[in-house]
Image (cartoon, rainbow, N blue to C red):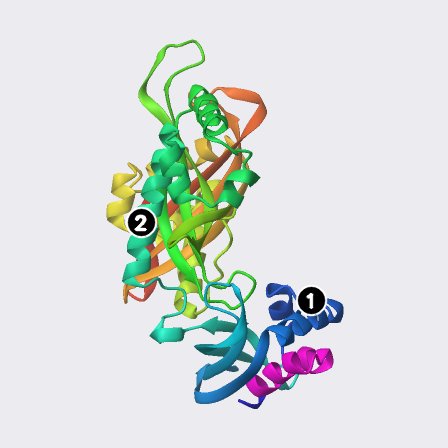
């Protein structure tokens, strides 16, 4: 709690040395205050907005070796109201923050601060937020797939439309027409979470999606049966605007790495890496050790006799394989569902014929892993479309 108090004091007194002493470098970079010049500017702006601030400790508990989570109640008098508007008469604001600390360089230092007001669980949406975002994404799907301008306005901020060069309906509809002429697109939401992390994006909801392109005919106008589908990950940032959650920003960031944080998560990720390495290296022992019998049967590669030729064919067609776990979810005590972003250079076409130059394959997969005799093994893998 002394570290928490010092952190708040550093802002109140614009004391950069104190700020550096009680925070990690990663934390300072994460909240956009990597150096003292930027910090002093931010702290000065905060001091102008806040008339008073009081921190009341609630609890502190160890969360593992060398880590602590401290909960505190914050009461402030602010010249910025809850809608972000400037007000002449200060308004009262009450929030609950959870401060995560780590032991570093012989001292306790802050590595993150989360807004948990109202009992919010870090990273989770409330039921009302989840419903509101689902409605927004349904509107966005209609806009993005069919050029529906009313749905576009309902699901996006004016700033987002301006950044995408869609200042009016005709420009947006022309974009969708051009896009669909090349490859009709659809949006499949996969993961939604609230950014509880207190930084420049506080109050933001992140929605990871897969944008799916479906081709029914080839370049010569001949039907493709079954149609060709490919999915690319994308990330949307939603903010509250006009009484709704709206898309304010988009980025190719759905493939950001989700670092495993405990022994079970690390073991599951290692099983996935070993499985992919097995295909690249023709290692049947690793293949058997990282998969269930039912999965191998579904792959038509139950044993080494079938796996050997299949892996040799695969490894000669693939170069520069890269694997990134992007979302680690433990669905139960004995089940993980983990999304991965996988890229490689394909040295052959769909029929196995060599191509020159190779072409990049960029895919998003979901692995299901189960705990069998104390070991995490893969029981299912599906492409995310």
Residue at 71 percent across and 81 percent down: it is 15
* Residue lying farthest to the front in this orientation: 88
Write down the residue under mark 2: 134
| Mark 1 surroundings: few (<14), some (14-19) or many (≥20) residues within 10 A | some
Question: Tag 2 or tag 1, which sits nearer the N-term?
Answer: 1
Position of residue 104 measured from the top left corner of the image (x, y, whole percent): 62, 80
**Magenta segment range?**
3-21
Name the residue nearer the viewer: 198 or 87.
Answer: 87
Position of residue 46 measured from the top left corner of the image (x, y, whole percent): 62, 73
Name the residue nearer the viewer: 218 or 373.
Answer: 218
> Would you say 362 lies left or right of 124 here?
right
Name the residue nearer the viewer: 124 or 265.
Answer: 124
Residue at 41 percent across and 61 percent down: it is 194
Q: Secondary structure at mark 1?
A: loop
Position of residue 346 measured from the top left corner of the image (x, y, whole percent): 52, 30
Which image quarter holds the C terminus? top left
Residue at 68 percent across and 73 percent down: it is 44
Q: Compared to 44, does 338 lie above or below?
A: above
Tell me if residue 80 can be seen: yes
Write down the residue under mark 1: 34
- Residue 374 magenta-highlighted: no
Name the residue nearer the viewer: 293 or 193.
Answer: 193
Q: Compared to 140, does 12 lie above or below?
A: below
Count numbered badges in the picture.
Answer: 2
| Mark 2 surroundings: few (<14), some (14-19) or many (≥20) residues within 10 A | some
Residue at 48 percent across and 26 percent down: it is 175
Residue 289: which disc? none
């Amino acid at each position: 709690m002394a570290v928490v108090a010092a952190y708040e004091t550093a802002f109140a007194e614009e004391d950069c040395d104190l700020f550096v002493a009680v925070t990690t470098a990663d934390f300072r970079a994460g909240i956009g205050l990597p150096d003292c010049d930027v910090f002093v500017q931010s702290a000065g702006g905060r001091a102008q907005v806040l008339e008073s601030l009081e921190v009341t400790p609630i609890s502190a508990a160890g969360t593992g070796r060398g880590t602590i989570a401290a909960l505190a109640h914050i009461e402030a008098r602010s010249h910025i109201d809850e809608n972000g508007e400037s007000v002449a008469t200060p308004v009262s604001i009450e929030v609950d923050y959870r401060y995560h600390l780590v032991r570093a360089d012989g001292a306790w230092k802050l590595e993150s601060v989360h807004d948990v007001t109202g009992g919010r669980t870090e990273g989770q949406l409330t039921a009302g937020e989840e419903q509101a975002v689902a409605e927004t994404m349904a509107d966005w799907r209609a806009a993005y797939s069919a050029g529906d301008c009313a749905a576009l306005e309902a699901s996006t901020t004016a700033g987002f439309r301006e950044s995408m060069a869609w200042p009016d309906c005709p420009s947006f509809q022309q974009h969708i027409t051009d896009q669909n002429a090349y490859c009709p697109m659809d949006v499949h939401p996969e993961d939604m979470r609230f950014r509880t992390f207190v930084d420049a994006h506080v109050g933001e909801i992140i929605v990871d999606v897969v944008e799916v392109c479906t081709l029914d005919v080839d370049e010569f106008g001949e039907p493709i049966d079954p149609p060709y589908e490919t999915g690319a990950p994308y990330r949307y940032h939603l903010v509250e605007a006009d009484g709704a959650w709206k898309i304010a920003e988009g980025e190719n960031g759905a493939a950001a790495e989700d670092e495993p944080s405990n022994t079970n998560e690390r073991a599951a990720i290692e099983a996935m890496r070993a499985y992919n390495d097995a295909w690249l290296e023709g290692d049947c022992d690793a293949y058997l050790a990282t998969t269930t019998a039912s999965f191998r049967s579904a792959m038509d590669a139950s044993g080494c006799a079938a796996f050997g030729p299949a892996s040799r064919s695969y490894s000669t067609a693939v170069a520069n394989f890269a694997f990134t776990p992007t979302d680690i979810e433990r669905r139960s005590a004995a089940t993980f569902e983990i999304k991965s972003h996988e890229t490689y250079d394909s040295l052959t076409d769909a029929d196995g014929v060599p191509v020159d130059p190779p072409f990049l394959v960029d895919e998003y997969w979901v692995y299901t892993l189960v705990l069998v005799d104390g070991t995490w093994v893969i029981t299912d893998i599906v492409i995310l479309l």
